[in-house]
Amino acid sequence: MTTFHIITLFPDSFGSYLGESILKRAIEDKKIRVRFYNPRDFAANKWHRVDQRPYGGGPGMVIEALPVIKAIEKAIKKSKLKTQSSKLKIIFFSPSGKQLTNEYADKIGRSYSDIVLVCGRYEGIDARVKKAFKMEEVSVGPFVLTGGELPAMLVIDSVARRIPGVLGDINSLEESRVASPDVYTRPEVIEYKGKKYRVPKILLSGNRAKIDEWKTRKIK
């Protein structure tokens, strides 16, 4: 079973996504496991505060290194409790990191039993965290988000759907077959504001070769 260890200040933000549909079933069927580690639980002060002003000046707040380090350390210990053969990968989200792709998701899903996802917030996490552990910086796209929670959900989804049994039918994995971005279902004709919209005739032909050719053209 693949276990995702999430380091985040906001574990509740994952509830709606992990609690529905395919990922919910994957968790219930023990295809995947998701654990959360809140750096606030490892804060050295009674207020559980983990953010401080950045050295060198600048706006916003920076998440302290030690609470995050201790959270990651606990995740590593949890992974070792499963089995001594557990293989662990730590991912740190950064706009300048390696691009998340289907190939990357497939690689880490096959290579690691435990994946630690470190979610930043505010102006980021003290860079010394990256020096304390061997980790890989990953980006989900050429843009900046307010936190690493959404990227973490993307990684969980993209990795989990490749695990046998998660999708039910492995043919549902679009990148392993000819799949058009345009799809149609019943009824054959719908009417809206006096105009009729029809399913392309080729999809009704039953000619698999021509249908795949049509789908390939759509992809291009």
Image: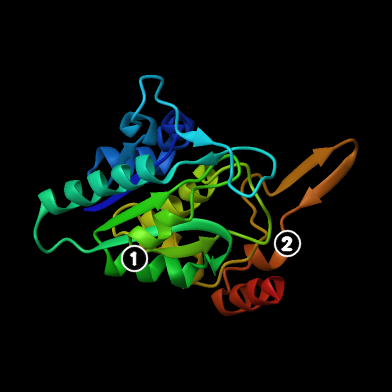
Look at 42% across and 32% down and name the residue there.
Answer: 11
Q: From the viewer's side, name the closer residue of 186 and 81.
A: 81
Mark 2, other Cα within 10 Å: few <14 / some 14–19 / many ≥20: few
User: In the rendered view, does 110 fall on the left or right side of 142?
Assistant: left
Task: Decide which of 74, 213 is in the foreground and name it.
Answer: 74
- From this view, report whether residue 111 is shown above or below residue 194: below
Image position, residue 135 (x, y; %): 38, 63
Residue 71 in the image: state x and y as whole percent: 31, 42
Query: In the image, 17: left or right of 196?
Result: left
Is tag 1's residue or tag 2's residue first in the polypeptide sequence?
A: 1
- The kind of residue on which mark 1 rests is Lys
* Residue beneath the point at 27% across and 64% down: 112
In the rendered image, the vertical position of residue 6 relative to residue 217, given as above or below: above
Q: Which of 160/218 is in front?
A: 160
Front residue of 139/47: it is 47
- Mark 1 — residue? 134
Q: Secondary structure at mark 1?
A: loop
Is 127 situated left or right of 74 in this image?
A: right
State the CA–CA distance, disc 1 to disc 2: 52 Å
Give percent across and percent down for residue 56: 63, 50
Q: Quadrant of residue 193?
A: top right
Task: Determine whether label 1 and label 2 are within 8 Å by CB.
Answer: no
Residue that mark 2 sits on? 200
Q: Residue furthest right?
A: 194
Identify the residue at image location x=64%, y=56%: 183
Dot 2 falls on a residue whose secondary structure is loop
Residue 168 marker: none
| Residue 10 showing in the rendered view | yes
> Which amino acid type is marked by label 2?
Pro
Look at the image and tell me in which quarter the C terminus lies.
bottom right
Q: How far across and down, in percent of the image, does residue 122 sit?
A: 59, 39
